[in-house]
Image: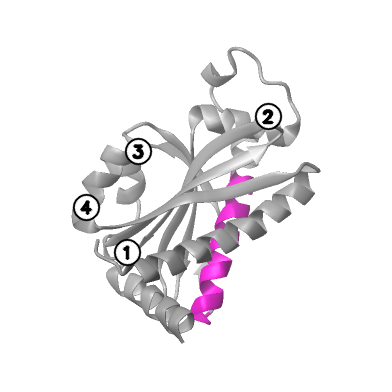
Amino acid sequence: MEIDPLDLDAICELVNIGVGKAAGILSEMTGSVIELTIPNVSIYSQDEFSQILSQIGKDRYSAISLDFQGVFSGMTYSIFPAESAHVLIDAVTGDEISDNEYERPFSSIDAETLKEIGNILINGVMGSITNVLQSQLTYSLPSYCEADIPALIQNVRQEHREAVLLAETHMFIRNLNIEGKILIIMGAESFETLVRRVREISRG
């Protein structure tokens, strides 16, 4: 999807502000210093969804989702590959990582832990966006699932899956680098609203 580089930089800054706030909350929650960085943000149109698969593959992810409605409508996901999800759970809970850690299925307690972490990440990013939009959004309760990217996209209502913002996340906790991604899937009008408001603020 074509987007002015200045607009993309402004959106990337919004996401970075959001994950920065989330990192602060997670640091307080765990008692450990947590750093969160966003090395890359990309925007895709509906016709370019295949490029997402070529970039991040068809593996299954642990996904935390939050539906949002208002002037800006769609679905936000915080997703982690299985290995990163296991490392994240153990880093947050303080458990030791065993050799066969990545082979065990996720328990209900694991899912709840991931859901809490993902919810904090999503709320940080969406809070940053709503500050720019200057409008309140209505959110669903967070939910957890394990699925591949096509299934996650298909889970969003058709009119709300015309554009995807994909942000790579790197979380550093206790000398561990945990990779994940944030996906904001939205309708074309919602994306245009976001770009317009970002442009108004960043360029006066």
Which badge, 3 or 1, comes first in the chain's sequence?
Answer: 3
Q: In front here: 99 or 139?
A: 99
Secondary structure of the residue carrying tag 3 is helix
Q: Which residues are magenta?
A: 115-135
In the rendered structure, the answer to whether residue 29 lies left or right of residue 126 reads right
Q: Which residue is mark 3?
A: 56
Label drawn at residue 90: 2
Q: Are marks 2 and 3 in contact (CB under 8 Å)?
A: no
Kindly indicate the quadrant of the structure image that contains residue 156.
bottom left
Mark 4 or 2, which is nearer the eye?
4
The reply to whether residue 21 is visible in this rendering is yes
Residue 1 locus on image (x, y percent): 24, 61
Q: How many marks?
A: 4
Alpha carbon distance from label 2 to label 3: 24 Å
Which residue type carries mark 4? Glu
Secondary structure predominantly adopted by residues drawn in magenta: helix
Alpha carbon distance from label 3 to label 1: 21 Å
Alpha carbon distance from label 1 to label 4: 15 Å
Alpha carbon distance from label 3 to label 4: 13 Å
Which residue type carries mark 3? Ile
Which residue type carries mark 1? His
